[in-house]
Structures are given as C-alpha cells and as structure tokens.
Amino acid sequence: MLLYDAARPNPRAVRMMLLEKGITVPARDVDVDGGENRRPDFVTCNPGGQVPVLVLDDGTWLAESGAIFQYLEEQFPYPPLIGRTPEQRAITRMWQRRVERRITEPLYAAFHYGPAVEMYRTRMVVLAECADGFKVLMQDGMAWLDALLAGATTVVPERFTVADIALFVALDFVSSIGWPMPSDLRHLQRWFRATAERPSARASLHPRSSQTGAHY
C-alpha cells in the first residue's frame, strides 16, 4: 500500500488511525498548496482531486477518508475503531455521519469559502458569501454535540472510534487558525482535551505544522 499524504486535516485523520492501530504504511507527500493534487496525472486516478488517497497493492486508488477508514478497519481489525459487531459498526457510522453533517462539513466549507477562498477559487466552486453562514452551522453543531457529551468521554458512547478522530482533527485545525472553540462548550472542551492527550494526536501532526502553526 501507499498513502498519498498531505498537510491537511483529512490526511491527518488517516495518520491518526494508523497510529492508533500501530500500522506503518509508506507515504508520499502531496503539495496541496502548489496544486499537485489537481494535476492531470493525479486527477485521472482520483477524479475528486483530493487527499488522502490509499493506493492498494493491486493498484486500486481508494479516496475519501471514510472509505479508507473502512478498508483499514477490515484489513486490521484490532484495536477496533469502527466496531467488532455489525451493530457497533452501524452505530459508529451513524455518529460519524452526524459529526460530518453537523460540524465538519460546514467547518471545511467555511474555511474554503472564507480564509482560503483565494487558493480555492481556481480549483472549485466557491461561495464566499456563504462562509459566515457555514460558520454559524458549524457552531450550532458544536453546541448540539456539547449537550450530548455531558457525562460521556467519546462521541460513540464508551468507545473511541473514527468519529472521535475525524472530529478532533477538524476542531484542532480550525482552533489553530484562529477559530477557537467557544469556551462555554465545556463538555466538548473536556472531550477535546482528553483526545489531544492521546499519543496519536501529537504524533499525527504533519511536519509542516511546526513551520506554519496550523495543526494538520
């Protein structure tokens, strides 16, 4: 296998999962800032033009972090980060989707349409006028989850999963670029601090993080 990696939150989520499972996969860094992921040779294999990508041993290009999570879980089931049983796996996917829909998807849209709009203007449809609205949706989702985390230590009750990983890397990224988590969300703040203490959280940071100050 080969991981097309980059200084971005979603590749970090895959790195964090690999660390949690104790897996080492050869990696090649992609220069997203320079547009390497939008070049014809890359887009021919991955029409989405995104990172991360996991190239399998038979040459298959597997994109989308959720799909990569699923593949790695099936190939390396222990420790389980999606679930041991069909019920556990379904519950994890349910929570992962809730986190994506209510927090991480509006979060990334707010970033692409706001602070990063000039970079992405030539790469995708950008709606700069929607940036503030997506930020409001992100904050509403965070408040929604904060209430649900009262008395809980993980997004999926009693299990650390890929839902925690996906949410953590997104919130760590935006906090590092000047969008701090509201201080009144004390349950989410507690969850975030506990997740940040996991060895995989620090070890998954891209080397560029120390140069730019952005956590990805």
Image: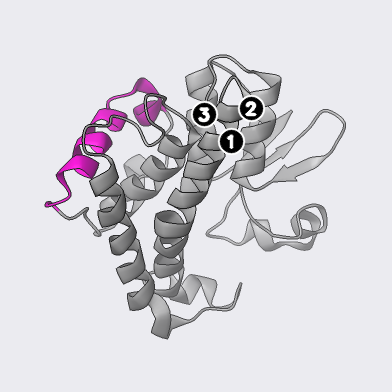
Q: Give yes or no for contact between labels 1 and 2 (Cβ–Cβ under 8 Å).
A: yes
Looking at the image, which residue is at 35% across and 45% down? 215
Q: Amino acid at mark 2?
A: Pro
The first of marks 2 and 3 along the sequence is: 3
The region drawn magenta spans 183-203
Disc 1/disc 3 C-alpha distance (Å): 18 Å
Foreground disc of the pair 2, 3: 2
Q: Badge 3, how many Cα within 10 Å: few under 14, some, many 20+?
A: many
Which residue position holds label 3?
Answer: 17
Residue highlighted by disc 1: 90
In the displayed orientation, state which residue is furthest to the right. 58
- Expressed as whole percent of the image width and height from the top left, the position of residue 64 reads 64, 48
Judge left or right: residue 99 versus residue 189. right
The first of marks 1 and 3 along the sequence is 3
Name the amino acid, label 1.
Ala
**Magenta stretch holds residue 68:** no
Residue 23, x across and y down, in percent? 59, 18
Residue 36 left/right relative to 178: right
Specify the quadrant of the image occupied by residue 108: bottom left
**Is 115 rendered above or below residue 83?**
below
Above or below, comparing residue 127 to residue 54 in the picture: below
Depth check: give the residue in front, 48 or 186. 186
The image quarter in which residue 141 lies? bottom left
**How many numbered badges does the structure rendering display?**
3
Residue that mark 2 sits on: 86
The dot on residue 130 is none
Image quadrant holding the N terminus, namely: top right
Q: Please, is residue 185 above or below residue 87 in the view?
A: below
Could you say where residue 105 lies in the image, as x and y percent from the top left? 47, 60
Q: Residue furthest left?
A: 184
- At horizontal 35% and vertical 76% (from top left) the residue drawn is 133
- Please, what secondary structure does the residue beneath circle 2 have? helix
